[in-house]
Amino acid sequence: MRYESLQRLCVALIVVSLATAGFGVPAVNAQFGGLKDAARKAKEAMQKKKDAEAQAQKEAEAKKEAEAKKETDAKKEPEANKETTAAAQQAPADAAPSFQVYSKFDFVPGEKIVAFEDFSQDAIGDFPAKWNTNGSGEVVTISGKPGRWLKLAGSGFYTPEFITALPDDFTLEFDVLTPPTFAGYYLNSVIAQLPSDGAANWSAATNSFILSLLPGSGDLGTSQTQVRQDSASAGQNSKSVKQFTKVANPVHISMWRQRQRVRVYLNEEKVWDLPRALAQTAKFNMFLFALRNDAGESDYYIGNVRLAVGAPDTRNKLLTEGKWVTHGILFDVNSDRVKPESYGALKEIVNVLTENADVKIQVVGHTDSDGDDAKNLDLSKRRAASVRTVLAKEFAIAEARMETDGKGESQPIEKNDTPAGKANNRRVEFIKK
């Protein structure tokens, strides 16, 4: 018994020794390894859950932000469309042609403005007080176009009754506008010799010159001239013009009479030059517009009618008399930007300065009395400086030859109580130094 008990004790000791020596480690490690793997998997699952929740929150926020932006854009869209439409309407008026475009423009307005009509003295919706018609019309404003316009809305004639005489030398200017939906007939601009009560019978005038315009729907419109001398037809001509279409308007019309000769410009281009258009004995006493408008689709809009008389004599005025005054240098409203249609008048002074290299001048700006005195003084000075800049940059006249000054409204040459008086006071003077 003792032997067997001793034997069992030895075996137990051997087992304990083997375990202590490490022969039982793999089994223990397996047990603890399983526990660690489970913990790792649980941790990974938890992290995946957190990542999924974060991603879901991120996507929800992105969706919410996108919806908010869409709502904001939707609110802005009407204003954006409104601004786009306004810009489209203003494009023709705001587009500023370069001086190079007018390089062949030799039109120079007459020396003195005798009639000017911008409809500023008439109420919107009324027919202008100083005009007459057997049709229908009203003074209106047009979105994107500066100033006021006379809408010619019915068949018949429209005449400014303040124009009663057209001498041997005069210039006549006006603007014409049509809507994009225009579909109709010619606008006739008529210089005529008629009895005082004979406007309705303008087509049978003793002497007349008729300029007819029709805006085209494509790239070209149409211009016609008809001449009547001593109660008989004396010629008719027609040509296509690119300056006046449904999309290329308003168009500025400049007509220049020098005795029998008539020149017509559409914007910067001379379209007609007729040396014998008028009878030598003609005594023109009326200007009118005439049109046919059956269905109300031939509406024309007229603005800025200006009649000036007297041929310019730049050389004599500057070199002999010491001063040349011009109303042909034009500016944007309340601005010192010189309009390129001033090219003809600028070229007049350039020719004199080029041929007389020792002559120095002072450029002086003048305004009418509208607005604040101090602002008008500043504007006149800035306009004179702008003229000098244009003469230097566009025509290579040395700036050292030119001083500038401005008098504002302080030196009017006429009263400022009529449109024509104000137009004459808005001027640029070149004074020999």
Image (tube, rainbow, N blue to C red):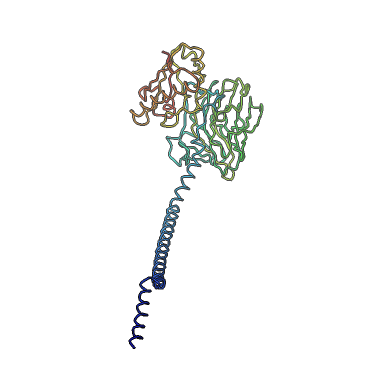
Image point (48%, 22%), residue name: 393
Quadrant assignment for the N terminus: bottom left
Foreground: 124 or 180?
Answer: 180
Image point (41%, 13%), residue name: 433
Name the outermost residue toward the front. Answer: 3
Which quadrant of the structure image shows residue 227? Answer: top right
Q: How many marks?
A: 0
**Horizontal relation, residue 322 to residue 102: left or right:** left
Foreground: 214 or 10?
Answer: 10
Name the outermost residue toward the bottom. Answer: 1
Q: Position of residue 400 (x, y in %)?
A: 42, 16
Up-down relation of residue 82 to residue 271 (above or below):
below
**Horizontal relation, residue 405 to residue 179: left or right:** left
Q: Position of residue 409 (x, y in %)?
A: 36, 25
Which quadrant of the structure image shows residue 374? Answer: top left
Q: Position of residue 159 (x, y in %)?
A: 52, 33
Foreground: 60 or 304?
Answer: 60
Up-down relation of residue 54 to residue 144 (above or below):
below
Q: Position of residue 37 (x, y in %)?
A: 41, 68
Foreground: 165 or 412?
Answer: 412
